[in-house]
């Protein structure tokens, strides 16, 4: 008895230390994420301020260029960039003020720039006013003096000093970030080692208990097998089957939930990639050659395609989750699918012949999606000629059978099963656009209704899809 109590105490201690080390491990991961987010925001702010300062100085230069052009030529068309720049300067000042966000050092530096800018703007306004009053010589004398040049030089120097300070801040931010990151990594490695050691120790202590429990369980199972009657055995099997069915449904729900969560979480790194590419192009776009720009374009296109695939996976996981299971006129559902594709149907002048379809219990939204996908595929894979689509129906003993036929390119017999796989494609994307998920949707929708989807096709002669729906399908 004492030995058993001592063993249980050791197991509890090992369990406690294992959980504690896991908490430390997860805390290190969370802390690293927080630190990365904090310092990334600081770096982005510094880059944005530099970007705004560059634009701000350019606007002042544009205003001065308009003033000089007008003074030298007396042509008022030169005042257009002058007035445009004056209106944009105020807006840019507001953007810089928001970015600085009451930072004392940055505010002090920017106030100095604002003071010099105001002096420069007053000089520009004064000289233009003289020109309009006919005092061109006085305006030219002011422009030829060193006052404006000195003022612009001081503004340039102050903005250059501001940018230098921002670069220093960026360097300090990076150094601080890497210092904290290294500390967190050390904490992570230590926690990982401790967790591994505690897990090994806990496993070594639990293994004898598991073996003992297995032995006891084996003896109990033998006793049950010897004493149970045939009726009791049948009841046990039936109960086990019910339990397994419930477990399977639960796992399916968990799998769908996982696909939903994963699809949302996977979008975030894609958005991060595109945001960083855009930031990099804004900062260094003028220094990139055509080959580098083509690389960035390829990355953005690949990210967009991945985003569409993830969105398709999300929609796939949501099939059957709607509460739209009810009695529906299939004729109306086909009309709704046609209305969704109206632009495409009009553009291709597609002909659709629909037989008299029944009114049955189905998932309305999913059935509209099924017919919409099949009609869209029929049009897409019918290049160079007018699409002709037929939708028929036949009642079977225990099922409703629908058929969607077209006059498209068809396919080889070896490909008829492959097309229903998720992301499966028989053609490259340049030939026929899409993600290869439409028919996978159709297969899942048919199975949701207790049926299946099959295909008959001849290359270059067309394709027929057969969809069966059970008459005894139940809403789950």
Image (tube, helix red, strand yellow):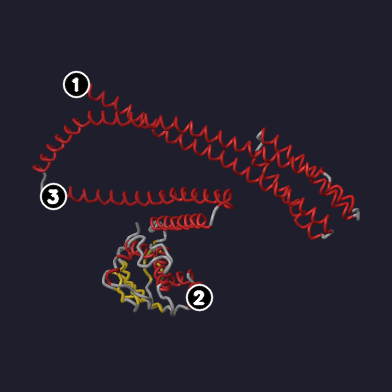
Identified at 8% across, 42% down, the residue is 226
Quadrant location of the N terminus? top left
* Location of residue 408 in the rendering, given as x and y in whole percent from the top left corner: 38, 76
* Location of residue 325 in the rendering, given as x and y in whole percent from the top left corner: 39, 61
Closer-to-camera residue (308/100) = 100
| 3D distance between C-alphas at marks 1 and 2 | 83 Å
In this image, 293 relative to 388: left or right? right
In this image, 222 relative to 70: left or right? left
Identified at 83% across, 49% down, the residue is 125
Residue 177's place in the image compared with 256, above or below, is above
Mark 1 / mark 2, whichever is N-terminal? 1
Q: Considering the numbered disc 1 on the image, is that residue within a helix, a strand or a loop?
A: helix
The residue to which callout 3 is attached is: 231
* Location of residue 380 in the rendering, given as x and y in whole percent from the top left corner: 42, 72
| 3D distance between C-alphas at marks 3 and 2 | 67 Å
The residue to which callout 2 is attached is: 347
Residue 474's place in the image compared with 224, above or below, is below
Mark 3 Cα shell of 10 Å, populated few (<14), some (14-19), many (≥20):
few
The furthest residue to the left: 226
Mark 1 / mark 3, whichever is N-terminal? 1
Q: Nearer the viewer, mark 3 or mark 2?
A: 2
Q: Quadrant of residue 437?
A: bottom left
In this image, 321 relative to 282: left or right? left
Closer-to-camera residue (219/191) = 191
Identified at 89% across, 54% down, the residue is 136
Q: Considering the numbered disc 2 on the image, is that residue within a helix, a strand or a loop?
A: helix
Mark 2 Cα shell of 10 Å, populated few (<14), some (14-19), many (≥20):
few
| 3D distance between C-alphas at marks 1 and 3 | 43 Å
The residue to which callout 1 is attached is: 3
Q: Considering the numbered disc 3 on the image, is that residue within a helix, a strand or a loop?
A: helix
Q: Nearer the viewer, mark 1 or mark 2?
A: 2
Mark 3 / mark 2, whichever is N-terminal? 3
């Amino acid at each position: 008895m004492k030995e058993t109590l001592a063993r249980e105490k050791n197991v509890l201690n090992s369990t406690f230390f294992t959980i504690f080390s896991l908490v430390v491990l997860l805390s290190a991961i969370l802390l690293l994420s927080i630190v990365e987010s904090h310092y990334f925001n600081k770096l982005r702010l510094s880059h944005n301020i530099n970007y705004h300062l560059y634009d701000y100085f350019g606007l002042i230069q544009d205003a001065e260029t308009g003033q000089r052009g007008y003074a030298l030529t007396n042509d008022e068309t030169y005042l257009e960039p002058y007035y445009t720049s004056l209106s944009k300067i105020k807006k840019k000042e507001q953007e810089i003020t928001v970015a600085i966000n009451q930072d004392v050092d940055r505010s002090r530096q920017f106030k100095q720039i604002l003071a010099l800018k105001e002096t420069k703007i007053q000089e520009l306004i004064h000289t233009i006013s003289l020109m309009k009053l006919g005092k061109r010589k006085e305006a030219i004398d002011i422009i030829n003096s060193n006052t404006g040049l000195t003022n612009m030089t001081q503004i340039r120097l102050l903005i250059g000093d501001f940018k230098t300070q921002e670069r220093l801040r960026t360097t300090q931010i990076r150094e601080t970030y890497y210092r904290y990151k290294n500390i967190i990594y050390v904490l992570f490695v230590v926690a990982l080692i401790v967790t591994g050691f505690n897990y090994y120790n806990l496993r070594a202590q639990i293994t004898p208990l598991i073996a003992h429990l297995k032995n006891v369980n084996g003896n109990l199972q033998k006793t049950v097998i010897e004493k149970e009657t045939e009726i009791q055995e049948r009841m046990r099997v039936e109960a086990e089957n019910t339990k397994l069915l419930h477990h399977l449904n639960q796992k399916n729900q968990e799998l769908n939930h996982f696909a939903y969560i994963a699809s949302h979480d996977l979008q975030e790194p894609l958005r991060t990639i595109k945001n960083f590419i855009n930031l990099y192009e804004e900062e260094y776009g003028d220094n990139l050659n055509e080959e580098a720009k083509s690389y960035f374009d390829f990355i953005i296109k690949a990210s967009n395609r991945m985003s569409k695939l993830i969105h398709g996976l999300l929609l796939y996981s949501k099939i059957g989750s709607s509460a739209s299971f009810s009695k529906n006129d299939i004729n109306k559902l086909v009309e709704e699918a046609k209305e969704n594709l109206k632009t495409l149907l009009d553009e291709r002048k597609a002909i659709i012949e629909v037989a008299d379809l029944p009114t049955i219990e189905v998932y309305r939204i999913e059935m509209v999606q099924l017919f919409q996908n099949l009609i869209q595929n029929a049009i897409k894979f019918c290049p160079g000629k007018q699409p002709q689509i037929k939708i028929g129906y036949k009642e079977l003993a225990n099922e409703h059978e629908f058929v969607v036929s077209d006059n498209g390119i068809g396919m080889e017999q070896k490909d008829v099963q492959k097309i229903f796989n998720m992301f499966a494609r028989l053609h490259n994307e340049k030939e026929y656009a899409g993600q290869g998920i439409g028919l996978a949707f159709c297969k899942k929708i048919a199975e949701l209704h207790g049926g299946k989807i099959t295909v008959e096709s001849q290359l270059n002669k067309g394709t027929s899809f057969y969809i069966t729906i059970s008459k005894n399908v139940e809403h789950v």
